[in-house]
Image (cartoon, rainbow, N blue to C red):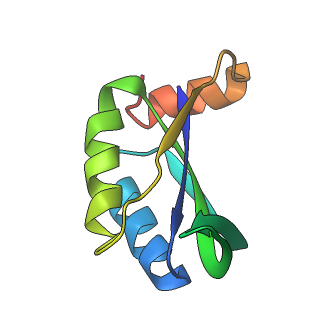
Amino acid sequence: MLFVYTTFRNHEAAQKAAHALVERKLAVGVNTWPISAHFGSAGECKETEGTAALVRTFETKLPEVENLIAEFSPGGVPMVAAFAVWRINRLYKEWLMKQGFE
C-alpha cells in the first residue's frame, strides 16, 4: 500500500479528483483538507490557499494516479509524493480484500 500526498489549487478540484480516483478504483480512499501553502518563486516567499489530499492506493496504480492528478491540475505542475506503508491493521486489510483491492 502507498500513501500519496498531493495538493490542488482549490477544494472543488480536489473533490472532483478524489471522486474520480475512487470511482475508477485507482484509490481505496482519499482524505482532503484545506491548507495554506508557502513556496519560493522568483526569490520571494509566496503564500496561497489550496487543498491537500492523501490518497490510499497501491504501487501498481501509481502511474495512473499521477496522470489523474495532473488532469485535475490544469496549468500547474502538481507535486505527487508517494510513501510506502509498511503495515496496516488486519481488519482494514481484510476489508480491502473484500472490496477487490490486494
Q: Is residue 12 visible?
A: yes
Specify the quadrant that holds the C terminus. Answer: top left
Q: Pick the residue in front: 73 or 92.
A: 73
Q: Residue at x 33, y 63 (%)?
A: 20
**In the rendered image, the vertical position of residue 88 relative to residue 44, given as above or below:** above
Q: Is 8 left, or right, of 32 in this rendering?
A: left
The x and y percentages for residue 43 are: 61, 67
Quarter assignment of residue 18: bottom left
Q: Is 24 left, or right, of 80 in this rendering?
A: left
The x and y percentages for residue 10 are: 52, 82
Q: Pick the residue in front: 77 or 95.
A: 77
Q: Is residue 25 visible?
A: no
Q: Residue at x 47, y 31 (%)?
A: 98
How many numbered marks does the figure carry?
Answer: 0
Q: Residue at x 26, y 65 (%)?
A: 71
**In the rendered image, the vertical position of residue 10 relative to residue 57, given as above or below:** below
Q: Residue at x 37, y 61 (%)?
A: 77
